[in-house]
Amino acid sequence: MRIILLFLIQWSFLVNLQAQSDWDTFVAVDGGFKINSPVDLELREDTLDTDIGSIVQRTWFGESAENGLVLIINRYEYPDYTIHSDSVELLKEFFQATLEEAILSVDGELLYESEKDYRDFPGRRWRIDYLDGQASLKVQAIVIENQFYSIQIASPSGVEYSEPTSRFLDSFALLTEE
């Protein structure tokens, strides 16, 4: 019995080690960040014409066919004097409106929201379940000067996705920190 238990522990460790080694650091020089990801991320760019001026949107995305994870990083560059990380009162409204739009966009239910700053920059983290609880969207939202980052990972619901979800969101880092 001990041999079987020892084998299962070693096998579990090796499977976990293999899953961790499949991740690489994705560097987006044009986005000014790096992040750990189990898949390569593709870039799409757009310019949004709004009442406050043009907003440059860059979206990096990828999907893992192996486990159904969908990874998205949106970076919005706002015009000067519109949104900024030192605009404390404005950011409360901004994060609230962003959260409400996220819930509406997936017709989901908010499970939690918390403050989760990145370094000295204001941020929020939330989880939304959607598709009647069959899928989950976890988001790290950060405002860095006049740039808004929305780091998102969608997955089928389940405890087994907790580690890769946190690993992806927590690995975000600006390139200027090196």
Image (cartoon, rainbow, N blue to C red):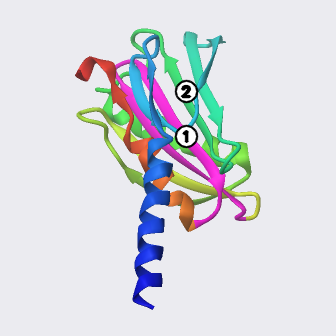
Q: Would you say 13 lies left or right of 165 here?
A: left
Task: Tell me the kind of residue under disc 2.
Answer: Asn
Task: Tell me the kind of residue under disc 1.
Answer: Gln
Q: Is residue 150 magenta?
A: yes
Q: Is residue 148 visible?
A: yes
Comparing 94 with 2, the one in front is 2
Q: Residue at x 33, y 27 (%)?
A: 87
- State the CA–CA distance, disc 1 to disc 2: 8 Å
Looking at the image, is 52 positioned above or below residue 84? Answer: above
Q: Would you say 93 lies left or right of 152 here?
A: left
Q: Is residue 113 magenta?
A: no
Q: Are marks 1 and 2 in contact (CB under 8 Å)?
A: yes
Q: Main secondary structure of the magenta part?
A: strand
Instruction: Point out the tag, 1 or 2, that comes first from the N-terminus.
Output: 2
Q: Quadrant of residue 50?
A: top right
Q: Residue at x 69, y 55 (%)?
A: 108
Please provide percent x and percent y for residue 54. 58, 8
- For residue 74, the mark is 2
Looking at the image, is 129 positioned above or below residue 35? Answer: below
SS state under label 2? strand
Give the residue furthest to the bottom: 1
Please provide percent x and percent y for residue 20. 45, 48
Q: Quadrant of residue 122?
A: top left
SS state under label 1? strand
Comparing 101 with 157, the one in front is 157
Q: Which residues are magenta?
A: 133-158
Looking at the image, is 178 positioned above or below residue 142? Answer: above
Please provide percent x and percent y for residue 92. 41, 40
Comparing 74 with 101, the one in front is 74
Residue denoted by label 1 = 152
Quarter of the N terminus within the rendering: bottom left
